[in-house]
Image (spheres, grey):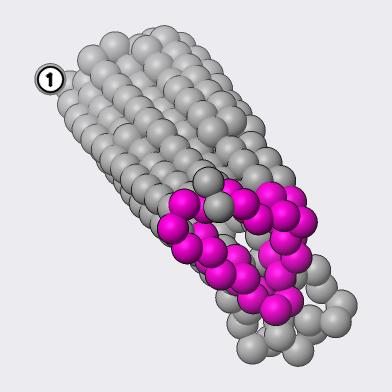
Amino acid sequence: MESLTINGFGSSGGGTFQTVELNGKGTINGDVECKQFSCNGAGTLKGHVKAETVKISGRASVHGGIAASSVRIDGSAKVEGDVDADKVKIAGHASLSGHVKGDDLIIRGKASIGKDCEVEHFTAEGCFTIDGLLNAEQVEIKIHGGESRAKEIGGRRIRCTAHRSKFLSLLKPFLPGPALTAELIEGDHIELANTTAKIVRGNTVIIGENCDIGLVEYKEEFRQAKSAKVGDSQNI
């Protein structure tokens, strides 16, 4: 099976390849199926990509969706379709217009997801925007700066903590704090800090510092930090 490599300006049709490598400014017109897909330059794929591994270190625009075992985005990627992968790691910037499904999603850069995100493990240390539902068995959010939001967050265990570097701590009076915003957060065990939400519902709910919650509904345990604002709490 042959490989496809574009090093300079060039274009190619889609097809099945061993590897696909875009090192220059390349365009692929059609769907691609391969073992390894990598974009180190400025690449445009006018179709879907199905691969074992997808790695984007440059700037890529995918007009279709991505189906892969592993997706890593260190550069900038725009994907108009759905992303279905066992593991997705975003260390750069990703704009994903469709659904995201898989086992693990790790965000250490900046990501926007246009529809629902359904994974087993969701880990974020960067900023994210999810226009639909974030649903995962485990949700671990460590916000170091900026704002993140999701329409709804659901999971078995949900934990959100806020962190600042020493340098940013010195600028605290001048900068907005790291924050998470959602309309509804629902899970079995929930721990939140620097979070704004209309409703938080769970078995055990721990509302930490700098939270602003409209309503807390809990079954077993509810704790609230002194600096947290909770409009109402109900044992259900």
Q: Is residue 63 visible?
A: yes
Up-down relation of residue 37 to residue 211 (above or below): above
- The range drawn in magenta is 205-234
Up-down relation of residue 99 to residue 138 (above or below): above
The quadrant of the image that shows the N terminus is top left
Q: Disc 1 residue type?
A: Met
Residue at 61% x, 82% y is: 165
Secondary structure of the magenta portion, mostly?
A: strand
Up-down relation of residue 233 to residue 222 (above or below): above
Q: Is residue 122 left or right of residue 93?
A: left
Residue at 76% x, 56% y is: 231
Up-down relation of residue 112 to residue 170 (above or below): above
Of 172 and 152, which appears nearest the observer? 152
Residue at 42% x, 44% y is: 155
Circle 1 Cα neighbour tier, 10 Å, few/some/many (<14 / 14–19 / ≥20): few
Residue where numbered disc 1 is placed: 1
Q: Is residue 122 left or right of residue 162?
A: left
- Is residue 207 part of the magenta span, yes or no? yes
Of 72 and 103, which appears nearest the observer? 103
**Residue 212: x and y, percent?**
74, 60
**Residue 110: x and y, percent?**
58, 51
Q: Secondary structure at mark 1?
A: loop
The quadrant holding residue 152 is top right
The quadrant holding residue 177 is bottom right
